[in-house]
Image (spheres, coloured by chain):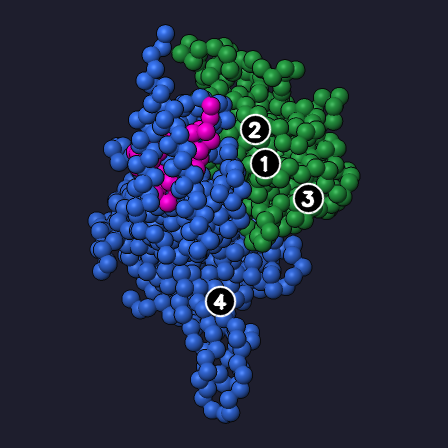
Chain colours: A blue, B green
Amino acid sequence: MEEVDVELSITLIPGAGFHQKHLGFEWGPGDLSVYETNYKLQGPRSAGSPFVHIVRRDEDICSPILRKLFNESHLIFVGLQKIKEDMPSKNKKSQFVSISKNYRSVIRACMEELQQNAVSTQNGSLASQYGDQVSILLAIELIWNLCEVLFIDAAPAGSLLLQLLDWVRLHKSDVDAKAREVLQSDSPTQHQSYWDVVISLVLQGRMDEARQVLSKQASLRAESSSVFRRMDGLLQTMPIFNVRASGHAFPKLVKNVLYFTPKSEEIIYSTSSMNMFLGPRASPEPLDIILLSAFEFDLHQVIKDCSIALNNWWFVAHLTDLLDHCKLLQSHNLHFGSNLREFLVLEYASGLFTHHSLWQLAVDYFDHCPEFGRVYLELQVERVPLDTERKAIKVLRICEDRQMSEQVRSICKIMTKRALRNNRLGSALSCSIRAKDAAFATLFPHRFLQDYSNKGSFTDLDLLDNLGPAMLLSDRLTFLGKYREFHRLYGEKRFSEAARLLLSLMTAKIAPRSLWMTLLTDALPLLEQKVVIFSVDQTYELMSCLEELNSGTKDSNLTDQDEDIESTKTELLRLALARNLTMAIVKEGTIET
Amino acid sequence: MDPIAKYISQKTSKTRWRPVSPGLLQQPEVFATGSWDNENNRVSVWLVGDHGGCNTDGEFDEEPQLLCDSQHAGDVLDLQFLDQDRLVSASSSGAVTIFKLQPDCQALSLAHVWERAHGYSCDNAPCTAVVCRSPELVSVGEDGRVILYKADQTEVVRVIENADSSTIHAVTFLRTTEVLTVNSIGQLKMWDFRQQSDMWEVHFHPSNPNHLFTCSEDGSLLHWETTSGSDMSTLLQRGWNSRVVSHSGVPLAGENDSVVSAWLAGDSSKNRLEATHMLPSQTLSVNSLDVLEQCLVCGTDGEAVYVHRQLPV
């Protein structure tokens, strides 16, 4: 079987390639990037165009009417995947047939709308574009219908023939128009479509009408009238195929037209008659070749030829998926591990993913590719542009539902950084909590504490107060939550509880070393209360914390002034701690009477 | 009865019924939709109902028909009818726009736009929700601002800066000067425009009817019915992307703060909540729904709108 020969189409890229400049290119997921290089065949050097052009192969995806096709078929696809394996095959078959009919009705609905638009539009080029799309959809529906009749419905020979006749009738509906044209013309037998009409009518099983047209010939030519009379007689007596009487051979009518072998129930169609049937053309068109492959029951060839002829994977992906469900495709393992069905569905879905809006549909397609679907989704989902939080949440939800924790983390990181840049600490924090990203969650406490030391109070208290279990995500976060609690307790004048908490932050090593000075400074007002708050033991612990802090290596970056401040603070603390200690000892040593 | 579906080639973020004139006993017939995630987004107005045999085969004259539409810069994140003739949209570009609908619904034009109502110093901040009680509008956004406008004034009336450190997802009016907001971590807050920064946290959701409709991210559109009281908190926990619209379409609040309603009172162990799926099969996320009288309209990420005109309520 010869390869379908598709003419190479040339696309002009406006603004590139002038002055004999060579173009360079790079493949992208759904498109091609083209740019001007410095290399030039001949002539002096000249300034080139600084632009990178993006060339998109599949323009169908941008058509608003075809978008309906993609969306509706997505729903049908998902429904198909849900058909249970353990259903009895008889029920399954009828379901598959109805799904196939669903697909076809969606194609037809699209076709009708395109046709309406083609007729009503004023724009000439748009009308021709619509017209092209209509003819492609027509061809697609024709092939699908044939595949449905031959493979999916796969009725026994009798009803198969009737269905085929129906198919022929449906798709050669212009016979009626042509017949009328022929019969109404001045000399019907001289009409160029005369024989076309006769043969079409015979093929459609409309013998009486064929005889009527043929009779025009008979009445004209006296010398060949006997031939025509015999033909007429044959047509009259030919048995129309009867469903009950299966096994009858369809008698040879016109030489090389149609031949049935009762045993194998195969239809063998010769190339010459194919040409007669579909119209006189110099060489078989891609559509003819595809139909021929279908009649020869060569599914793989049908799929292969369709893939080449069409510029969009929609048709082959959905048809192959359906045929695969009907168990009609041999497991034809391709080099890279996945089977034909999965390969096609992956290609289609990858194309969808490059669309700014239809990427959501692609997710379901990837879900139903067991080998590589998940990997493809993981790679693609991170590239969806996230302009709003709402969209980011949708993408996150897709990843979370599929336990793609890497992708969740990465998306949350992007959102967190964006929120931080705009000073939205609450959004940033809630995002990193959602990602359960401990490392990132450590950034916030730093920011919050910076704010605290700069302004003397916390901002975004509502967030800190309601961290809940998220507090445990990272040590820093826990510290921040507890530190805020300390301030709250202090504000409510629950001093002893506050004191206990403050101490535990240091002794339990929840607080980072760098903040101990801040914490100790916070302890000062508690130490200087009239009432003793810190007990003796607690005071000793505070003292040891202070000494531990001071025994550490000095920060050499501190200026002299800073060092002075630090040592003053330490002195003040030591004094306050000593005073507290004496008061505490006295208090604890006193016996209450 | 199954709802009627129509594929409209754009992902629908919001669907809203046009309010019917009070006093006229008719079913709502006109609804508006807003799109998102398109390079060119649109706000569209549709007609559904008996338009008297507009189609040759008569099969689809119940399908929604496009009356008019308008360009919209940015995703439509919220859409509300201010009154019969005016539509307000919240955009992902941070703009709040008022559209005017011609009386015969033949055209939709831009009446006024507050371009950068919401924004950061060096970036755009999406406006996430808008609520109307004519002539006042309130909008909230990812920048944590709550803004009060009057429909006929070009200057905004009040801005509450930094109302929230997280993104505010939704807003609704309680009284004329009070609004309720919910943020991305699920906190409900009440704001009073008379005072600058008073803030309460509220832990209930004010609504009254026996019928409730919810739509959510997982593609389900549910009709909840209860005769006795039920636990509202379980409803809210279903996922923080659910949008809840009460049957009467207007959030109700009692005169005092403690509203007791059929949904909130009672012990959850005794109560049953019946939920029915309203769409024939599970679709992609149902983003928005609106209920008026006996009619429901919703829009999905599968680029389809569904209209149900005979709700069992």
Residue at (34%, 33%) from the top-left corner? A542
Along the viewing direction, whichever of B59 and B26 lies nearer the viewer:
B26
Look at the numbered discs 2 and 1 and tell me whether their residues touch, using CB distance below 8 Å. Answer: yes
The residue indicated by pointer 3 is B97
Residue at (68%, 29%) from the top-left corner? B195
Tag 1: amino acid: Ala
SS at mark 1 in the image: loop
Near mark 4 (Cα within 10 A), the count class, few <14, some 14-19 or many ≥20, is: some
How far apart marks 3 and 4 lie (CA) works out to: 34 Å
Residue B67 left/right relative to A487: right
The residue indicated by pointer 1 is B163
Q: Which mark is residue B189?
A: 2
Same chain for labels 3 and 4? Say yes or no: no
Same chain for labels 3 and 2? Say yes or no: yes
Residue at (34%, 65%) from the top-left corner? A271
The residue indicated by pointer 4 is A54
- Quarter the N terminus of chain A occupies: bottom left
The magenta stretch spans which residues?
Answer: A502-530
Check if residue A526 falls in the magenta segment.
yes
Along the viewing direction, whichever of A279 and A210 lies nearer the viewer:
A279
